[in-house]
Image: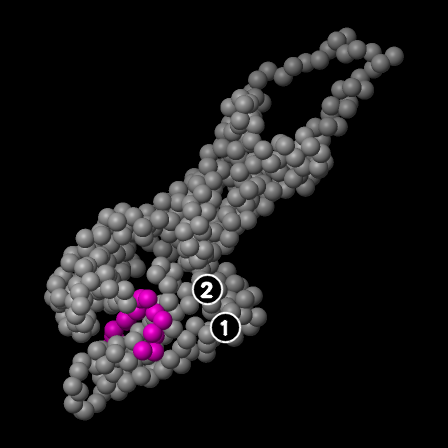
Amino acid sequence: MFKRTDKLKKKQHKSLFRVVVDKLHLWLGLGAGIIVLIVSITGCLFVFQKEINDYYYRKILYVTPQNTPFRPVSELKKTAQAVLGSDKPAMTITTYTRPDMAWEFMSYKGNDTALTYFGTLEHYESVLVNPYTGKVTGKIDYKYNFFSIIKGIHWSLLLNDKYGQTIVGWSTLIFVVLMITGLIMWWPKKWNKANRDKSFKIKWKAGFKRVNYDLHNVLGFYAMIIALVIAFTGMVWAFTWFQTTVYVVASRSTTPPDIKEYQSAKTTAQLSQDPLDIAYSKALPILKDAKRLFIYPAAGETGVNIISGNKRDETYYGSDNLTFDQYSGALLGRRNDSHKNAGERLIDMNYDIHVGAIAGLPGKILAFIISLICASLPVTGFYVWWGKRKKSKKKPVVIRASAVPSTM
């Protein structure tokens, strides 16, 4: 007499595996959702930081090309250092082969004992100099730059790395679990037309609850692969063990790369040029395909000058590195990108993959969209849970035996 209600109970029954998956997805999502939202939104904002910064600081970053040679690097460095101050040594110099760019002299000093982002940065400043005239075009305080703060939130929630990056890292790992459990929950039991429509299409004409559910379910599926790539590249920075795993898998070796160390030796020889200028003039023909050159001046008595050439305007992977004696300007060593193993190359690409820059503007647009979808998932997921929670609080409908039609 009660066969129909028995069938309803059978339909509602779930396997233990699905119950565990559902609970994991729910409680992990509620626990880490707010961090995922913050990290995704800030990542979304950061994608086009170069384009926006280039426009905002255009009067500082760009110069009018002239038919005169560039001034010596050492001369420009002295000019920039006078603006930075003696207590803020230029640690990185960025020069360009294109004629309309100012050269950048950056100084950075951290404080690992502080609790917050602003405390961990004692200073992070750059002076831009016109390479033709030697005049300062401007100064940028990156510590308080909008995108530096956005990056600080994204990277470590504006906390010291040892605290904030741990929270972000584990939340990212939880996000990976959420994507996998979400895929299991999304997977249709039967691949008929009705289920395919539910899984791959958003029913825009339906009510709010259904549209919200579809936004969570369908967009989560479409974003999953790229979202996982973004998450994994983020975990490379958050966890040493994960970066090591990526290196080992890519290089097929547990042996660290063999990188020769060099030291400068003091000399009494008289030089006609500053050793940094000698090194730079030697680097230019060797790194002839480079669009940007990064100069890392020597630190300490035995330190060396390192000049790195990058062949692309924005990405950072694939650079060739030259090492020079700080006293004589002699070339001590060379390590090209081609000398690196697959593990090193993949780690070098990590930032460019993470922000989508490795695929140019289309890649950055895709990273922006996927990050936006990732930011929406905790919100739509919360509303799905809240709707079910409110529904479960409603008084259950009791079906009397007399109200069930007899099958006899």
In the depicted view, which residue is nearer to us: 114 or 265? 265
Number of numbered discs overlaid on the protein picture:
2
- For label 2, the residue is 347
Name which residue lies at 50% across and 48% down.
227
- For label 1, the residue is 341
In the depicted view, which residue is nearer to us: 275 or 41? 275
Name which residue lies at 55% across and 49% down.
225
Please, is residue 222 above or below residue 404 in the view? below
Question: Looking at the rendering, in which quadrant would you find the N terminus?
Answer: top right
| Badge number at residue 243 | none
Question: Looking at the rendering, in which quadrant would you find the C terminus?
Answer: top right
Category of crowding for the residue at label 1, using alpha-carbon neighbours closer than 10 angstroms: few (below 14), some (14–19), many (at least 20): some
Question: Tag 2 or tag 1, which sits nearer the N-term?
Answer: 1
Q: Residue furthest front?
A: 67
Q: CA distance from mark 1 to mark 2?
A: 10 Å
Residue type at the position of mark 1: Asn
Residue type at the position of mark 2: Ile
Which x, y percent locates residue 291? Answer: 32, 66
In the depicted view, which residue is nearer to us: 113 or 34? 34
